[in-house]
Amino acid sequence: MSSPLEDLESNLELFIENVRQLGIIVSDFQPQGQTTLNQKINQMVTLMQEVDKSKNKVQDIQVPLEVFDYIDQGRNPQLFTKDCMEKALARNEQVKGKIEAYRRFKALLLLELSKVFPTEMAKYRAIRGDERPAT
């Protein structure tokens, strides 16, 4: 048994193919093709009803709006995930750099404060439970 998402996908593919065939029939319409045209229109209505029935089964699927932007721009929507990962990695590197800068700043600040205020810093270290001597 296929999943609701696969059913929706196959119904959409059938619908798209039916619309393509309908366009061909209409672009070169001949009176003897009326029966075929009616069949295609009925198939299209049936497929639209199937798609409508499928919507309740796939309501919990959330698609980021950016994916639709990718499609509108003619880009492959599967690249969205790759681009998100690359952006996340770049942002992670930035944050990692900031964290390291703050650690160095903290160490330097503690060192300088220990030079200027040795007794207060000793009390601070005792309260914090950090018995390391200032270097």
Image (cartoon, grey):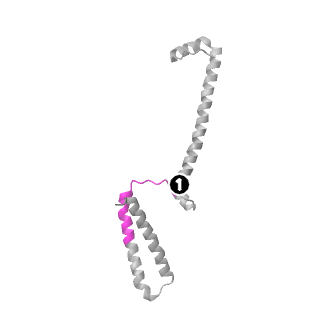
Instruction: Give the residue displayed 39% in from the left and 75% down from the top.
Output: 43
So how many labels did they put on this image?
Answer: 1
From the viewer's perspective, is residue 114 above or below residue 5?
above
Which image quarter: residue 59?
Answer: bottom left
Name the residue type under label 1. Answer: Glu
From the viewer's perspective, tell me whether residue 110 is left or right of residue 41. Answer: right
Badge 1 is on which residue? 66
Residue 63 % position (x, y): 46, 54
Residue at image position (55%, 16%) is 125
Q: Nearer the viewer, residue 74 or 3?
A: 3
Q: Which span of residues is magenta-colored? A: 46-67
Q: Main secondary structure of the magenta part?
A: helix
Percent from the top left, x then y, of residue 105?
63, 26
Q: Residue at x 36, y 68 (%)?
A: 49
Considering the numbered disc 1 on the image, is that residue within a helix, a strand or a loop? Answer: helix
Q: Report the quarter where the C terminus lies.
A: top right
Considering every residue shown, the one lying at the far top of the view is: 119
Q: Position of residue 7 (x, y in %)?
A: 38, 63
Residue 53 magenta: yes
- Crowd class of label 1 (few under 14; some 14 to 19; many from 20; radius 10 Å): few
Tell me what residue is drawn at x 42 percent, y 85 percent: 34
Q: Is residue 56 magenta?
A: yes
